[in-house]
Image: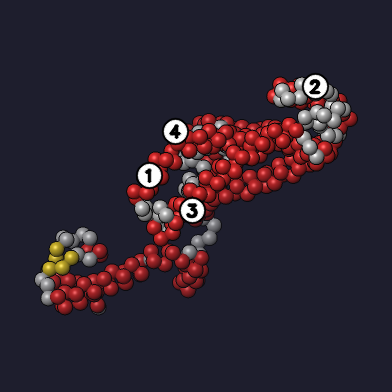
């Protein structure tokens, strides 16, 4: 299909030139005598489409492949997060949505193919339009239609960026303490006055920000359409995105059936209890070596071992006895190891417990 398109690009350029000239006549009343595409006085003369077509479709192919590789890496990352119970990127799994998860698994492969093909086409068309504009500006040097658009856009963007950086400078050096290192308002009265007068300008900039939001949403949606792990609708509305819902269902079903801890536990039960194959017990030395290797790979579990906790409890008890002798109090607070006793115990009971533990 991509090879069959270039021969018909010349006819497409001529028809597109007529449409562009018609639009320029409607938007620009200063030049009422615009002619066809061969006339150099056209507001937006279109260049040859072949160069833009080839560059656009090659760039779209490259971007799509990169996005797919990023998505495959994201699948691995999201699976590991699901194993840990981390819901920072994908929503939390709910038992009431199990049917939706399994149906999402049905659709995942088919949705992925459809999204990738459509994303490639849209991205190629989007890049094709941008490259035509750049090529026209480079080829003809003076494009009235683009100049008219840029005269409207550039001053607005300059005002927006100036206002944005002015707010950052004022916020850092005037309205925040310690140059923005602490989130505490400084010069509170000046801050309130600035908010009052800034409201009127921000009401105008809000229209510009809304338009920019729409344009960014379009660009982001086209660029990330091939990725099912990303929803352009945002965290609040991502559940109504069919592609993202299928992706979440795929992740949750994989997590439920391929969780490494679950698989190891089940295999351990099958190997050692239901179908025992080796009745030879490990020696005590080998068992200690296994424990040592396990603790080296999982150092945080050292503080949860029984011996460490017992030693910690004894040290706490000893410190409490020392404190009793220094302060000469008859009653002290209960240590953690005596959770089954009353909250207030006598000093003699503590001494008896300590004597028993010493031997």
> Left or right: 117 with respect to 200?
right
- The answer to whether marks 3 and 4 mark residues whose Cβ atoms lie closer than 8 Å is no
Q: Find disc 3 in the rendering and name its residue.
A: 169
**Label 3, label 4: how far apart the Cα atoms are:** 49 Å
Q: Find disc 1 in the rendering and name its residue.
A: 193
* Spot occupied by residue 267 in the image (x, y as percentages of width and height): 53, 52
Q: Find disc 2 in the rendering and name its residue.
A: 33
- Point out the image quarter for the C terminus: bottom left
Say if residue 110 shows up in the picture. yes
Q: Earlier in the sequence, mark 3 or mark 4?
A: 4
Q: Earlier in the sequence, mark 1 or mark 3?
A: 3
**Label 1, label 3: how far apart the Cα atoms are:** 17 Å
Q: Is residue 82 above or below residue 111?
A: below
Residue 311 lies in what quarter of the image? bottom left
Secondary structure of the residue carrying numbered label 1: helix
**Label 1, label 4: how far apart the Cα atoms are:** 51 Å
**Label 2, label 4: how far apart the Cα atoms are:** 66 Å
Frontmost of labels 1 and 4 is 1
- Picture disc at residue 11: none
**Residue furthest right as drawn:** 7
Frontmost of labels 3 and 2 is 2
- Picture disc at residue 96: 4
Frontmost of labels 2 and 4 is 2
Task: Count residues near mark 2 (Cα–Cα under 10 Å), then give few for <14, some for 14-19, many for 20+.
Answer: few
């Amino acid at each position: 299909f991509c090879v069959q398109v270039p021969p018909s690009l010349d006819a497409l350029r001529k028809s597109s030139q007529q449409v562009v000239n018609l639009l320029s006549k409607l938007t620009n009343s200063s030049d009422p005598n615009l002619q066809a595409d061969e006339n150099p006085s056209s507001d937006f003369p279109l260049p040859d489409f072949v160069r833009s077509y080839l560059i656009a479709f090659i760039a779209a192919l490259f971007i799509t492949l990169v996005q797919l590789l990023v998505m495959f890496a994201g699948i691995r990352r999201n699976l590991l997060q699901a194993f840990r119970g981390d819901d920072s990127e994908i929503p939390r799994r709910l038992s009431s949505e199990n049917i939706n998860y399994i149906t999402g698994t049905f659709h995942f492969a088919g949705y992925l193919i459809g999204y990738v093909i459509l994303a490639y086409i849209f991205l190629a068309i989007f890049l094709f339009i941008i490259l035509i504009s750049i090529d026209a500006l480079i080829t003809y040097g003076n494009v009235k239609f683009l100049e008219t658009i840029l005269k409207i856009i550039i001053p607005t963007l300059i005002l927006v960026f100036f206002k944005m950086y002015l707010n950052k400078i004022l916020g850092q050096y005037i309205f925040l303490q310690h140059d923005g290192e602490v989130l505490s308002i400084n010069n509170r009265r000046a801050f309130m006055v600035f908010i009052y007068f800034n409201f009127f300008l921000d009401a105008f900039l809000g229209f510009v920000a809304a338009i920019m939001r729409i344009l960014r949403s379009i660009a982001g949606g086209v660029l990330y359409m091939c990725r099912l792990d990303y929803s352009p609708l945002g965290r609040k509305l991502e559940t109504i995105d069919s592609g993202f819902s299928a992706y979440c269902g795929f992740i949750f079903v994989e997590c439920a059936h391929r969780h490494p801890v679950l698989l190891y536990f089940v295999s351990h039960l099958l190997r050692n209890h239901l179908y025992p194959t080796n009745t030879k017990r490990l020696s005590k030395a080998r068992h200690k070596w296994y424990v040592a290797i396990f603790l080296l790979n999982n150092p945080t579990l050292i503080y949860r071992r029984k011996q460490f906790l017992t030693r910690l409890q004894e040290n706490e008890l000893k410190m409490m006895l020392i404190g009793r002798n220094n302060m000469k109090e008859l009653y002290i607070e209960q240590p953690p190891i005596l959770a089954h006793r009353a909250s207030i115990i006598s000093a003699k009971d503590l001494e008896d417990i300590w004597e028993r533990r010493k031997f």
